Amino acid sequence: MHKHHFDTFDQQKDASSFGMWVFLVQEIMFFGGLFVAYLVYRHQYYMAFGTSSATLRVDLGLFNTIVLIGSSLTMAIAVNAAQRSLQKRLIAFLLATMALGATFLGVKVIEYTEKFEKREVPGANFCFNPQGAPCKGVSHEEEKTPDLIQRYLNGRFGKLPGLDKAAEHGAEATTHAEAGEAAAPEPGVPGEATERQRSMPGSEVYFSLYFAMTGMHALHMIVGIGLMVWLLYWATKGLYSAEYYTPIENFGLYWHFVDIVWIFLFPLLYLINRHIGGHH
Amino acid sequence: MSAHAGAIKGYFAVFAVLMVGTMLTYYAAFQDLGIWNTPIALFIAVTKAVCVVLIFMHVKDSNRLTKVTVVAGLFWLMILFFLTMVDFASRPWS
């Protein structure tokens, strides 16, 4: 079974496994850079990080943590099934892992959409000013998480502020003021601070790191689900058995690594300010 | 490293540890523990990560080369953190 440039099958497997681990070490360094950036700016903008962190949906974060841990378990069982040539079980648990991964990403979509609505996404439209004037187009009231999810499932998310600037500047310019919703960034009167400039110093750094870290994490999961489609295809063809399951094993390593990243992201992004009590 | 029928039990044990760790992290985050909030959260996170690496990722039963690779990776990560923090702590930031 082994390729001609290896002496034995075991040697081929060891080489493959070593290569995977070297790749994962690179991944450690990649995410490590983001964590170091977090550490430095957390110290520099201590209060802003705490205040910004409190806007995240901690219950959704907890739910996703549990989902991801569950997906690691199903993946470990899938690898085990491959090792024992249990083909049906391998397919079932690959599918379960994909379903859990997709659930995680779906929840992330709800969280991200809310951040866009609340103008907490870094960029020209950014506005985060919990102690000062409310941000235009953003409701001051905290929406309960079940309502948020329900509204998302019903497809009743409003226009995302800033995304339809072009439309707003067009025919509806007159009704703009009374509409009140879907705020566009202020036109930038010279000598006057924009809502973004009046935002809590450091909060945009927090949200930049939030989106960079969870975004890169989510991208890894999207890639992972894509790879699982490929593994699933070959699993149904009967390629994997106790004699040959290296791709399943190596993919399992990747998936568990992504889980580990989230194990650190959850407390550092969602939980740093919960003991202070109350939002903002 | 053949068989593995018994390994499933270990996976469920790790899953249980991860769930308990998650709940503990969540609970602890709402208590005012002074400066200890973050260290405790990170301690639990590291414990969870070690369980995943050793059992789910089979490092406990892997060959020496794999173990050295993992340790080397973590060592390099520590260098990244350590030197960055030395720089951060020893520079006059405005």
Image: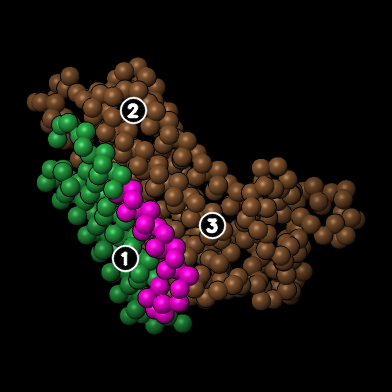
Q: In the image, A276: left or right of A137?
A: left
Q: Which residue is mark 1?
A: B43
- The one of A163 and A83 positioned closer to us in this rendering: A83
- In the rendered structure, find residue A30 and report the number of the disc placed on it: none
Q: Chain B, which colour? A: green
Instruction: State which region is magenta.
Output: B14-37
What secondary structure is found at the residue carrying circle 2? helix
Pointer 1 indicates a residue of which chain? Answer: B
Q: Residues within 10 Å of mark 2 (few under 14, many from 20)?
A: many
What amino acid is at disc 1?
Phe
Distance Cα–Cα, label 3 vs label 2: 32 Å
Q: Is residue A15 above or below residue B15?
A: above
Q: Chain A, which colour? A: brown
Distance Cα–Cα, label 1 vs label 3: 21 Å
Q: Which residue is mark 2?
A: A90
Is most of the magenta stretch helix, strand or loop?
helix
What amino acid is at disc 2?
Leu
Place of residue A233 in the rendered image (x, y in percent of width and height, measured from the top left)? 39, 22
